[in-house]
Structure formats: structure tokens, C-alpha cells
Amino acid sequence: MAWPVIVAVLLSACGGGNGGGGGGAPINAVLPDDCSVIAQNRFVSDVMKDIYYWVDEMPELDPDLFASPQELLNALLFSELDRFSVIADAAAEDAFFSNSQFIGIGMGILLTGGDTLQVTQTFSDGPARAAGIDRGFSILEINGQTIAEAVAGDGVSAAFGPDREGAQVNLRYTDLAGTEMQATLFKAIVTIDTVSAQAVFDVDGRTTGYLKFRNFVEPSFDALASTFADLQQQGVTELVLDLRYNSGGLISVANYLAGLLGGQVTAGEVFTRRVHNMQNADRNLTTNFVDEADALDLNRVVIITSGSTASASELIINGLDPFIDVWLVGDDTVGKPVGSYGFSFCDKVLRPISFANENAVGNTDFFAGFAVDCPAADELERALGDPLEASLAEALYVIDNNACSLSARSREKSRYTPPRSYNLFDGLQ
């Protein structure tokens, strides 16, 4: 017997959530009668055989022979392209996608060179911010381990300890002046402000908005509505959209943001077409742009990106590109033109890659990521929203000149393996 499994539609580089944003028709999968490993494995196998985008590349395996659902999923994946299918914790997903919350110390961090960990941002109600830790600080030790030791051992994620409220995290770090400090923090429920920075600049007579958008989750609807109403009231005619740490989320939020950007310029045009495997072709769906209230009706947008920009963020880039002038500043994006549905079982959510997203002209081939037009550094020593910060300064130059600066043109574009970024969950991403 096939049970109807209603699912959320998601685009994220780090897994998924059940927080709204669409649904799916029943699939040919039987929910487990119990939570034994065999029952869970059979459920995972059934879902994958039905909805997996690369089902034709999937090996025939006996699910009863695997020690866990995760082990089975790993064996089933089309490893050439699929870096994204996951089995996630249901409670953590729901908290994040429904409430923009997670359990942690409340900071984004970036691992570079295998032994350097830098803070990219801290969140307003998190323990890290309360302790005075800020963007640009360098973490030297986590719970007594150097970063090199953590990387060589169980990894940076494990070094932060268990994902539960009250878990203790001991940090040794340096501030921007190089002063060494220590702090003992306790993990708590942290709320990420989806719009984490906003500003308006006069760029040679052009009223230019800046919006740092952090994640595509349910609270984003209200945050974006309020922000764009404010930008509209201030007479903004140009926009810099900062997606450098945004690894994705709900397609419904992406469609809403795209409508706020394009407004009348893009209204009624194709935003994205969702394309499934052959046996699910009847699920294919076209989503159009909507002229949202307080839309800016932009003919041009400058987007700041990085090696953490993925999925729903890339959907914005790809969807707008046929209709308005899209400039990319910073570093090349991840490359995730695919999305997933979420299937709940026991205390988990299975999120197999289930469809590809193509834009109005059929582009869905950006697994290598979008290359930036104007390379620029993520200048961690300056605050997000500071017009002198390298990426924002370059974006404002583009607004003023419709071209890259000389320094950007001379900067070697970095087609490289991006530094490991842990932007959502203090190393648990």
C-alpha cells in the first residue's frame, strides 16, 4: 500500500526543512510500520526508486543489507553530481525552516587552509555575540583542540560538541587587534535574522539599497515585505543583494524575493520550471514571476556571492538573468541547479534530489557554479554593510559605472575549491 506523503519544496545546499513552500502528490512509498533499521531502509529505498532525479543511474541494492538509512543512501547516490541528498534530523529542520532557529553558539565560521577558522558573522541573540565575538575574529582552539587537530580528527563539526541546549563550548580566539582571549559559551536556541543588514547609499545621485539576505525560510516573507516597503519608501532605484552566505531554502521564498526585485519588469514571465525524472514528468511545474507589493521594478541588480552561495540563491540569479541585467560580485557560487522534496519518517527527513530547475530560456546546467563578473574579497575585517568592505565597495562601483573596477579586472578569478563554510550551525552544516 502506498501512503500519501506530503512534502515541502526546497532548494538548499545543506539539506532541507518541512516548513511550507509547496507540496507533492503521494509517492509510491510505504511509511515504516516501525523504526527498525530494516523498515527505515526499505522506506528510503522505495522513495529513491520513485522520485530520485538520477534514478536511472541508481544501483540495484538490497536495503536489508545496510546498517543504517544513511549508509544505504550513500550507496544509492549518483556521486558524479549529487553532493546534496541528505537524511536530516526532523526537529532541527522544522525549527530552522519554520522559525529560522537552530541550537548553537550563534556564529558563522569559515575554514581556510585546513588550520584557520575565521568568524564571518554572529547572530544578534546568540551566545557568541553576547560574549563580544564578532566578524573577523580568528578561532584558535575549540574545546581544547587546535583547528588543525580538529580537522585531522573527527572534524570541526564534532569539535563544537553535542547539538543540545546547554552544551558547553570553550573557545580560544583573537580579536581584530590580535589580542588573544578565551570564552566559555553554552549552546542555546539562536534565531537568525533573515535580513541581517540593510542600508541605503547615494551613488552619484542613484538611491541604492543594500540588503544582506541570510536564508530562505518562513520568517523571510515578513522580513522581506518590511524591508522592501522601507526601500520603496526611501526611493531606492538600484539594489545590491548580498547572498554571500545564503546556501538556499524554500522555493516559495525565492519566488517571492524574485517578484520583489523584478516587479512589473518580470511579472508573468517564467521564473523557473521544475523538471523531474521521466516517471514523474506529470509533476513538472512552471512558476511565474509575480508583481509583488512594494516591488522595486529593477532593470539591474548587483548580487554579492561566494563559495557558500547556492541553490535558492542561484535560482534567483538564473531566474532573473533572461529579463534584467544581473551582475555578480565576489566569488563564484556553489553550483546547485537541483532541488528536493522532504519525506518524513521516524525522527528523520529524507531529502533526495528530486528535480532540476531551469529558467525561461532552459538553462539548468550550472553544476560548476555561476562565475562572478567582478571578483572581490570578503573583507572580514569590515562589517557587513560597510561601503568600504571590498565586496560591497565593488558592487557600488558597478552601480556607478556599469563595469568592474580596475582592481577587480586585474584580480585573478578564483576557480578553486571553496573554503569550508559552516554558516548556519556552528560547524554542524
Image: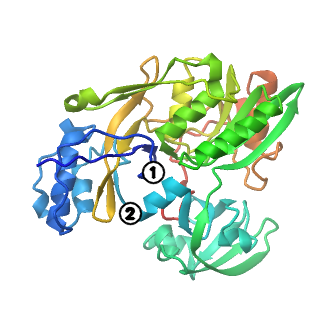
Q: What is the secondary structure assignment of the residue under circle 1?
A: loop
Indicate the amino acid at tag 1: Gly
Residue 89, label in figure = 2
Q: Mark 2 packing: few (<14 Cα in 10 Å), some, or many (20+)?
A: some
User: Quadrant of residue 273 in the image?
Assistant: top left
Q: Residue at x 41, y 40 (%)?
A: 22
Where is residue 25 shown, x and y percent of the image?
A: 27, 38
Residue 250, label in figure = none
Residue 96 makes an appearance in the image: yes
Q: Residue at x 52, y 26 (%)?
A: 319
Q: Is residue 20 left or right of residue 87?
A: right
Where is residue 154 shown, x and y percent of the image?
A: 42, 72
Read off the residue under disc 1.
19
Q: Nearer the viewer, residue 166 or 362?
A: 166
Q: How many marks?
A: 2
Q: Nearer the viewer, residue 266 or 412?
A: 266
Where is residue 46 shown, x and y percent of the image?
A: 17, 49
Q: Is residue 324 left or right of residue 136?
A: left
Q: Residue at x 80, y 22 (%)?
A: 401
User: Quadrant of residue 372 in the image?
Assistant: top right
Indicate the amino acid at tag 2: Asp
Q: Mark 1 packing: few (<14 Cα in 10 Å), some, or many (20+)?
A: many
